[in-house]
Structures are given as C-alpha cells and as structure tokens.
Image (spheres, rainbow, N blue to C red):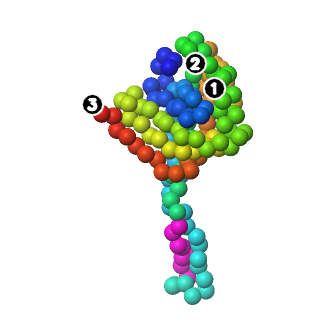
Amino acid sequence: MSKEIGWGTTMTGETTGEIGQILTARIVDSNVNFVECTNCSSDDGYDEFITTTLSAGQLNALLIYDSKYGGDGDGIAAALDTARKTKRVESWTLTAPSASTWVANGFVASLGIAIEVKGVTVQPVIIKFTGKITFTPATA
C-alpha cells in the first residue's frame, strides 16, 4: 500500500484490486423503495404507497493516489474505467485506519477524470451497491 496521503481509509475491489486511499466518502440514498398506488378512493385524497425493496444506496468518494509512494495513478484510473465499461459487479471493501471494514457488492456507476496536481492524483467515483452493506468493527 502507498504512504498515507489521505485520512488512511482505503478502497479495494475484489477484481479491480487496491484502488488507493479515500479523501472523502459518503454513503447516500440508502432507502426503502416504493410503488405509488393512489387512486380515486384514497382516504382524504392523500397519496398512497406500497413499500417494496431496500436499496443500499451508493458510495460517493474522492480517491487519492500518489505515484511517488508506490501508487499507480494511471493504472488505477484504467482499472476503474474497465470496471465501469464492463458493468462488472464485484465486492468492494472500505477499510478504515482502525481496521473496521464495510463490504458490499456493487458496480462503478460513475467515474470522473483522474487529474494530477503536484504529484497527487485525485478522481471522483460512484459505486452503486447491489446488496446489503456488511460492517465489521475492528477487534482490539
């Protein structure tokens, strides 16, 4: 792994491999899906819904890697682009500095351009989850 240049949280794809460190990360849109079923006899004219499935949401992250410390920015960007173009679902692991992990299956839904600034490459990515996120706390 490269020298810590972010906050020390890393991301790894089961097939894509070690991506690098995460500068920012947010898991958003974890929600309950529903079907709207309002009709003319709905009570008091309010909308009615039937809940259906759960959505694990997506990871919005800003990745950071530095070729001076063993990271391969071009290789990482190419691996992520291949994952996006092939629409490959794989297991993704986020590992915190404490060794706690979040693991979920998902695919690269969006990939920004990898831009190098002063030897450090940053790249935005969105991983859309296709199932439950499993959290494992670090053990002492």
| Mark 1 vs 2, N-terminal side | 2
The residue most toward the front is 15
Which residue matches tag 1?
76
Which residue matches tag 2?
71
CA gap between label 3 and label 2 equals 29 Å
Q: Position of residue 72 (x, y in %)?
A: 62, 19
Q: Where is residue 118 in the image (x, y as percent from the top left)?
A: 62, 14
Q: Position of residue 98 (x, y in %)?
A: 36, 29
Q: Which of 124 and 83 is in front in this view?
A: 83
Residue type, numbered disc 3: Ala
Q: Which residue is drawn at 68% across and 39% down?
A: 84
Tell me if residue 107 comes above or below residue 43 in the rendering: above
Q: Residue at x 55, y 84 (%)?
A: 42
Q: Residue at x 51, y 69 (%)?
A: 51
| Mark 3 vs 2, N-terminal side | 2
Tell me if residue 120 comes above or below residue 18 in the rendering: above
Residue type, numbered disc 1: Ile
Q: Nearer the viewer, residue 13 or 37?
A: 13
The residue most toward the top is 68
Which residue matches tag 3?
140
CA gap between label 1 and label 3 equals 32 Å
Whether residue 138 is visible here, answered yes or no, is yes
Per the rendered image, the range of residues in magenta is: 45-52
